[in-house]
């Protein structure tokens, strides 16, 4: 049987972020009037990607 390997969550997130950044920067180059909004969208996408890569700490792991 063929084993199907699905991409991990991080791989999917990286591809979606890359597409969003490239698309936003392309639209920012094309449309001068909306450039600030597209650049803000790019900053948001990169910030979200970095934020989702940071591992969450579990409350059971902490000593209080």
Image (cartoon, grey):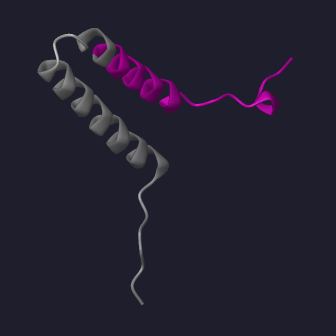
Q: Is residue 55 magenta?
A: yes
Total numbered labels placed on residues in the image: 0
Asked if residue 41 lies left or right of residue 52, the reply is left
Instruction: Find the magenta span and give its range.
Output: 39-64
Q: Quadrant of residue 34?
A: top left
Vertical comparison of 58 with 16: above or below: above
In front of the other: 21 or 47: 21
Quadrant housing the N terminus: bottom left
> Which residue corresponds to the image point at 39% horizontal and 85% vertical from the top-left?
2
Asked if residue 23 lies left or right of residue 58, the reply is left
In front of the other: 28 or 10: 28
| Rendered location of residue 48, percent (x, y) | 47, 25
Vertical comparison of 13 with 21: above or below: below
Q: Is residue 56 magenta?
A: yes
Instruction: Work out which residue is located at the far right of the displayed protein and give it.
Output: 64
| Rendered location of residue 22, percent (x, y) | 22, 32
> Which residue corresponds to the image point at 13% horizontal and 20% vertical from the top-left?
29
| Rendered location of residue 41, percent (x, y) | 36, 20
> Which residue corresponds to the image point at 51% horizontal and 31% vertical from the top-left?
52
| Rendered location of residue 37, percent (x, y) | 33, 14
Instruction: Work out which residue is located at the far left of the displayed protein and give it.
Output: 30
Q: Main secondary structure of the magenta part?
A: helix
Vertical comparison of 9 with 38: above or below: below
Vertical comparison of 4 with 37: above or below: below
């Amino acid at each position: 049987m063929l084993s199907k390997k699905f991409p991990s969550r991080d791989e999917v997130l990286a591809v979606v972020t890359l597409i969003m950044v490239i698309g936003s920067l392309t639209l920012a180059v094309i449309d001068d009037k909306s450039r600030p909004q597209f650049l803000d969208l790019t900053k948001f996408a990169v910030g979200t990607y970095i934020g989702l890569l940071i591992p969450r700490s579990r409350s059971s792991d902490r000593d209080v």
